[in-house]
Image: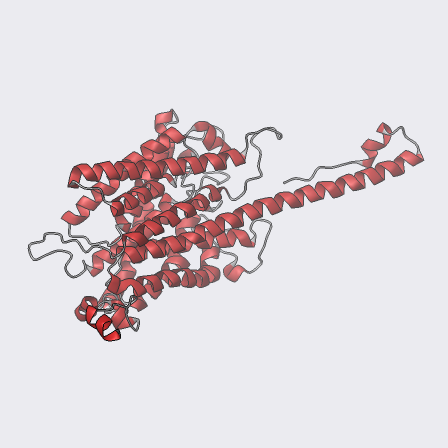
Amino acid sequence: MAALACSPAELHPLLGGGNATSAAAEYICGRFDAVSSKFVDTGYAVDNTYLLFSTYLVFSMQIGFAMLCAGSVRAKNTMNIMLTNVLDAATGGFFYYLFGFALAFGTPSNGFIGQHFFGLSQFPSQSFDYGFFLFQWAFAIAAAGITSGSIAERTQFGAYLIYSSFLTGLVYPIASHWFWSADGWASPARADNLLFGSGVIDFAGSGVVHMVGGIAGLWGALIEGPRIGRFDHSGKAASLRGHSATLVVLGTFLLWFGWYGFNPGSFLNILKAYGESGSYYGQWSAVGRTAVTTTLAGSTAALTTLFGKRLLVGHWNVTDVCNGLLGGFAAITAGCSVVDPWAAIICGFVAAWVLIGFNKLAEKLKYDDPLEAAQLHGGCGAWGLLFTGLFAKKAYVNEVYPGVEDRPYGLLMGGGGGLLAAQVVQILVVAAWTSVTMGTLFFILHKMKLLRISHDEEAAGMDLTSHGGLAYEYETEEKKEISF
């Protein structure tokens, strides 16, 4: 926020001239400058408070992930999946501090990798404050949390620590640099040489967060293979139902709540006017619109899944509805700030069918993902990028990404194919980068016999074999009679 200026030399004639008025002009301008500086300070404080509040909302999604994961696995693996969620945050915090943030946002840098701020050296700066680091860390650990769901119930505990460190310290940060850093080769914030004249619009991370986490989980689950009993000898799928629909619903609501920090918070600040100051319309309005599009996409996806699954399987399934809701959120995340609310309804409707379709395909291919994370975050995330290339509105694109004349916008909104082409490039690049890095890591762990637990451990449950006991204490009728 620029400070307002007061010049005694310009004010002096207006006060009538003379020695006395010269002193008065000096005094008035001094007071004016002090008040102006306070307004600047207040502007920074408001924006940083908004960013920190959004960070806390995004971090609360870790509670949602933990509850969702716990409810989606069998009771004998509850402690294991809860501990991995805690360590995603803790490990991610350490490695994102050491390497991740620098690789993602270490400006000045080249288009492929950041080069400064390792260990937050020379921090804060004119470009970044501590709140920005914390916000980006919360996103990094969200990607790691997505992956843990795909490989749940059969992965060695040490493998979790290795993949989480690698993902948050290297794989995710480099991908986020490409699309979110002002220096990134595909960033819409570049000063020049924009990809297809547009750059990629992945506002809050359908590709950077959801596709990275989902595709990493895809490779982990593929290399490990399905859980024991997921498919019988004839190849027919068997349901390994999670032990608590209550935890699934609780986790879903917590994730919904946190998404209001994830998407609207990605503006990074709120005190910004569009056009002339003093208007009712500014970035605060765009923040509100983004929350609305997020809500509508998720709600539409939930309802579409509810009735769609009822037609397909004949009953109302709360777990499917929760996953459909989250699929709608994952899809709208890319374009939430640049589309109209009516378009968000289309986004959610298609996202629900994308998830249903990928789940059918996964079952056909005997792919086992306990939380449907690869299908949900990878599949719906990719649809969200395409959706943005189709429905991004010109006025919103120019408000959120100003300074470029004739920037392409949504193909179906009359903006040409430049943006859609950039979005397709991101899908291909994220898929390739994550596959090469995380696929290779999981393959090496598999060959070193560090990835999957033994048959006996899997049958008994990881809580008992690796974590000192079961999460729940079961009391038989015989024990109850003895206690009396």
Nearer to the camera, 352 or 405: 352
Quarter of image, res 66: bottom left
Residue at horizontal 47%, vertical 62%?
98
Nearer to the camera, 46 or 460: 460
Answer yes or no: is residue 401 visible. no
Q: Is residue 108 left or right of residue 170?
A: right
Residue 449, placed above or below residue 232: below
Residue 48, placed above or below residue 304: below
Residue at horizontal 68%, vertical 41%?
39
Residue at horizontal 23%, vertical 36%?
307
Answer yes or no: is residue 209 visible. yes
Q: Is residue 408 left or right of residue 424?
A: right
Residue 238, placed above or below residue 203: below
Where is the C terminus found, in terms of image quarters? bottom left
List the single residue furthest toward the top. Answer: 414
Residue at horizontal 39%, vertical 40%?
334
Numbered circles on residues, count: 0
Quarter of image, res 427: top left
Q: Is residue 33 left or right of residue 199?
A: right
Nearer to the camera, 165 or 328: 328
Nearer to the camera, 114 or 142: 142
List the single residue furthest toward the right. Answer: 19
**Percent x, y of residue 152:** 27, 59
**Percent x, y of residue 103:** 45, 55
**Percent x, y of residue 418:** 37, 32
Q: Is residue 393 left or right of residue 9?
A: left
**Percent x, y of residue 424:** 32, 39
Where is the N terminus found, in terms of image quarters? top right
List the single residue furthest toward the bottom. Answer: 482
